């Protein structure tokens, strides 16, 4: 609700908010009053993951004939001028089609979560620019980037006509890598724009400096989808990509198993590897996940 309140407080006058509830059977979110015409509420029939949920929202934006789409995680609070600044930037620069805002940690509001990002086009490795740095004005220039976080992505609606929607076979994790790669392949320009600001609450596995480990669910989907994206999108230098993936996989398995004594995470990674090789994609439900927690 804080996220929706921050969007409704935007100083841009023509905003339509689309809320997609991906778990309607749990009743986690109460639909606002029907009098609130600024909000469209969509209850998904099943949990379609990050990819499917966003796709429902994008399709609704198309029906509304929106010129721009702003994909936004529900654990964010946006600056009231963010939408106005993004629209103004894109209206003056027709060569640019995608904006990645400056994202701060909510619990450390002066520290950067991401000031844009870079995707190695020959592997599946990404880097968050400015991760956990205190903002002292070092990222105040707009610049071209190769990776945009799915946490907050502002784009021309026709971008999704050109490159397609999120790949629902991924379900969650790695979906912004795949989308960014397709945007790059299409020759569409993405920009990090520092005057568009928001604060991200994050799950515990993303909060910097607190020594958290991923959940078994995250470990499974992250590594399954990394391999899938390499096989799906990388054509040139694929052998190099597989070598980098293998080295990172073995190093992470060793760290989880030997240093942290977390054999459940090792099992999740190996299960993800096996499913990716076998082509078992989409949402998966294993006993290994059912007691998982972000705590």
Image (cartoon, grey):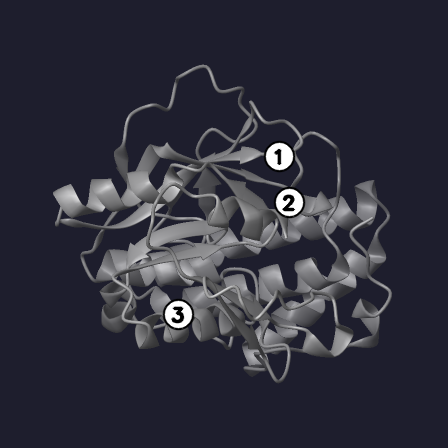
- First in sequence: mark 3 or mark 2? 3
Q: Label 2's element? A: loop
Q: Which mark is residue 58?
A: 3
Residue at disc 3, secondary structure: helix
**Which of the labelled discs sits on residue 123, or is there none?**
none
Question: Which mark is in front, 3 or 2?
Answer: 3
Q: Are marks 2 and 1 in contact (CB under 8 Å)?
A: yes
Q: Work out whether residue 270 can be spotted.
A: yes
The residue to which callout 1 is attached is: 106
Please rate how many residues cluster around mark 2, counting C-alpha atoms within 10 Å: few if below 14, some from 14 to 19, many from 20.
some
Label 3 neighbourhood size at 10 Å, few (<14), some (14-19), many (20+)?
many
Q: Which residue is mark 2?
A: 202
The image shows residue 81, relative to residue 159, as above or below, that is above
- The image position of residue 115, as x and y in percent, is 42, 34
- Residue 43 position within the rendered picture, expressed as x and y whole percent measured from the top left: 59, 77
Q: Image height check: is 227 above or below 260?
A: below
Q: Earlier in the sequence, mark 1 or mark 3?
A: 3
Q: Nearer the viewer, residue 284 or 4?
A: 4
Q: Could you tell me residue 167's position as x and y percent?
A: 44, 73
Q: Nearer the viewer, mark 2 or mark 1?
A: 1
Q: 60 or 205, which is in the foreground?
A: 60
Query: Quick one: which residue is furthest to the top in this view?
Result: 136
- Residue at position x 39%, y 70% from top? 58
Q: Secondary structure at mark 1?
A: loop
Distance between mark 2 and mark 1 Cα atoms: 8 Å
Residue name at image x 48 percent, y 67 percent: 54
| Viewer-closest of 254 and 18 | 18
Q: Position of residue 66 (x, y in %)?
A: 29, 65
Q: Residue furthest bottom?
A: 45
**Neighbours of disc 1 within 10 Å: few (<14), some (14-19), many (20+):** some
């Amino acid at each position: 609700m804080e996220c929706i309140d921050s969007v409704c407080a935007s100083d841009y006058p023509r905003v339509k908010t689309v809320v997609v509830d991906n778990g309607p059977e749990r009743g986690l979110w109460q639909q606002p009053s029907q009098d609130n015409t600024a909000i469209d509420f969509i209850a998904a029939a099943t949990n379609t993951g990050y990819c499917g949920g966003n796709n429902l929202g994008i399709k609704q934006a198309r029906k509304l004939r929106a010129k721009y789409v702003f994909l936004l995680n529900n654990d964010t609070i946006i600056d009231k001028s963010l939408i106005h600044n993004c629209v103004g930037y894109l209206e003056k620069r027709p060569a640019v089609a995608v904006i990645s805002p400056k994202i701060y940690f909510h619990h450390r509001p002066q520290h950067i979560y991401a000031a844009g990002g870079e995707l190695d086009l020959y592997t599946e490795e990404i880097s968050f620019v400015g991760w956990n740095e205190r903002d002292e004005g070092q990222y105040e220039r707009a610049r071209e980037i190769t990776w945009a976080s799915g946490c907050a992505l502002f784009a021309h609606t026709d971008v999704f006509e050109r490159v397609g929607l999120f790949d629902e076979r991924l379900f969650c994790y790695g979906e912004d890598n795949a989308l960014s790669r397709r945007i790059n392949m299409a020759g569409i320009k993405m920009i990090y724009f520092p005057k568009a600001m928001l604060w991200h609450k994050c799950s515990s596995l993303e909060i910097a400096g607190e020594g958290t480990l991923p959940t078994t669910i995250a470990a499974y989907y992250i590594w399954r989808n990394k391999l899938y994206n390499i096989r799906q999108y990388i054509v040139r230098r694929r052998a190099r990509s597989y070598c980098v993936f293998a080295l990172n996989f073995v190093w992470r398995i060793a760290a989880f198993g030997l240093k942290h004594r977390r054999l459940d995470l090792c099992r999740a990674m190996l299960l993800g590897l096996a499913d990716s090789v076998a082509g078992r994609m989409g949402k998966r439900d294993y006993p290994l996940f059912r007691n998982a927690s972000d705590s």
